[in-house]
Image (cartoon, rainbow, N blue to C red):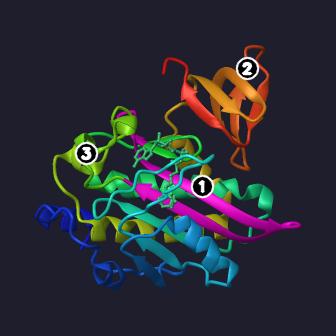
């Protein structure tokens, strides 16, 4: 049965029920991810816990999932709103065979997988990627990715891929801080979504895209990322450690850096930062 068939047959999911992890695990056919799950009804941050596990020598592909996070994290010390039983908060431990300089490719790979998953659950609009880590629908943030790596010398020890997705979280329940900028699947489709189906499909898509990245290289991921990139050719304002730059977004480099052309037509590479359309 395809995901579309499953969705068609699905009665609206009940909101506020605990995740049935066995329904997620039972339907997985993955090569590397999701062989082992750690489930919490509440945790500070799945990424923080995953880091502890990885330091103690976890196996690649272990997944940490929580119903709620008390200190859900975004980038740069920001907060990820994580109320119980409505959404998806998970972290996956990876041990990629990539040089540390290419670690950002994992965020982009995850963004590609996430857009593919989200695309299967919505129909009127297509998800877009906001470099480096946001998935937007209709210009509003549906999901975020927090990738944290531990490296030494020229080797990656492990990478924690943290993903938060708003599923059955109506915009009216969100805090005032994000209500104007965020969205959720239930808001987009007017129907609750099965968290088990979404989670299972996401692990499956991540497993496939991660395999492609490892085996065929970033060249197979980059065009799909570019296709989802909502800002190509647009005027953007980039805030990064080097300051603020206004220019035209041109796409991504092979290592995942964003390429922005400044007013003098000089191409600049941005490795980390925030990008917003100039008219935002
Ligand atoms: C992100 O950061 O978008 C990365 C979010 C990653 C969250 C996952 S949940 C599982 C794992 N464990 C963790 O502790 N984290 C990861 P950033 O680009 O910095 O965006 C953060 C900003 O998004 C905040 O400052 C808010 O403006 C906004 N925001 C917070 N919660 C949100 C939500 N639930 N939906 C949409 N936007 C939100």
Residue 100 in which image quadrant: bottom right
The region drawn magenta spans: 136-165
For image coordinates 35% across by 42% down, the residue present is 126
Q: Which residue position holds label 2? A: 262
Mark 2 vs mark 3: in front: 3
In the rendered view, does 123 fall on the left or right side of 231?
Answer: left
For image coordinates 22% across by 50% down, the residue present is 186
In the rendered view, does 89 fall on the left or right side of 189?
Answer: right
Q: Is mark 2 within 8 Å of ligand 1?
A: no
Q: Nearer the viewer, residue 75 or 124?
A: 75
Q: Which residue position holds label 1? A: 107
Q: Which residue position holds label 3? A: 173
Q: Residue furthest top?
A: 263
Please say whether residue 146 is one of the residues in the magenta stretch: yes
From what the image shows, is residue 252 above or below residue 153?
Answer: above
Q: Nearer the viewer, residue 32 or 279?
A: 279
From what the image shows, is residue 116 above or below residue 136?
Answer: below
Number of marks: 3
For image coordinates 30% across by 55% down, the residue present is 167
Do we see residue 268 in this rendering? Answer: yes
Distance in Å between CA atoms under marks 2 and 3: 40 Å
Please say whether residue 244 is one of the residues in the magenta stretch: no
- Residue 46: give x, y in percent of width and height: 50, 68
- Residue 36: give x, y in percent of width and height: 48, 85
Q: Residues within 10 Å of mark 2 (few under 14, many from 20)?
A: some
In the rendered view, does 228 fall on the left or right side of 167?
Answer: right
For image coordinates 56% across by 72% down, the residue present is 49
Q: Secondary structure at mark 3?
A: helix
Nearer-N-terminus badge (3/1): 1
């Amino acid at each position: 049965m395809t995901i579309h068939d499953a969705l068609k047959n699905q009665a609206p999911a009940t909101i506020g029920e605990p995740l049935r992890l066995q329904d997620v695990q039972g339907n997985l056919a993955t090569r590397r991810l999701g062989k082992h799950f750690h489930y919490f009804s509440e945790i500070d941050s799945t990424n923080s816990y995953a880091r502890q596990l990885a330091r103690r020598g976890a196996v690649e592909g272990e997944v940490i999932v929580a119903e709620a996070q008390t200190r859900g994290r975004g980038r740069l010390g920001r907060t990820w709103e994580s109320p119980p039983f409505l959404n998806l908060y998970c972290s996956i431990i990876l041990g990629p065979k990539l040089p540390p300089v290419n670690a950002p490719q994992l965020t982009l790979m995850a963004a590609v997988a996430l857009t593919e998953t989200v695309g299967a659950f919505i129909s009127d609009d297509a998800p877009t990627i906001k470099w480096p880590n946001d998935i937007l629908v209709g210009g509003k943030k549906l999901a975020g990715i927090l990738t944290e790596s531990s490296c030494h010398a020229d080797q990656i020890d492990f990478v924690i891929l943290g993903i938060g997705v708003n599923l059955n979280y109506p915009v009216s329940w969100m805090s005032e801080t994000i209500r104007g900028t965020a969205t959720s699947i239930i808001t987009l489709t007017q129907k609750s979504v099965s968290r088990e189906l979404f989670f299972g499909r996401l692990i499956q898509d991540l497993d496939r895209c991660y395999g492609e990245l490892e085996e065929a290289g970033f060249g197979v991921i980059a065009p799909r990322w570019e296709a989802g990139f909502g800002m190509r050719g647009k005027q953007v304002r980039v805030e990064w450690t080097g300051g603020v730059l206004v220019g035209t977004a041109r796409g991504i480099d092979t290592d995942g850096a964003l390429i922005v052309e400044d007013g003098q037509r000089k191409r600049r590479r941005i490795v980390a930062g925030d990008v917003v359309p100039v008219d935002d």
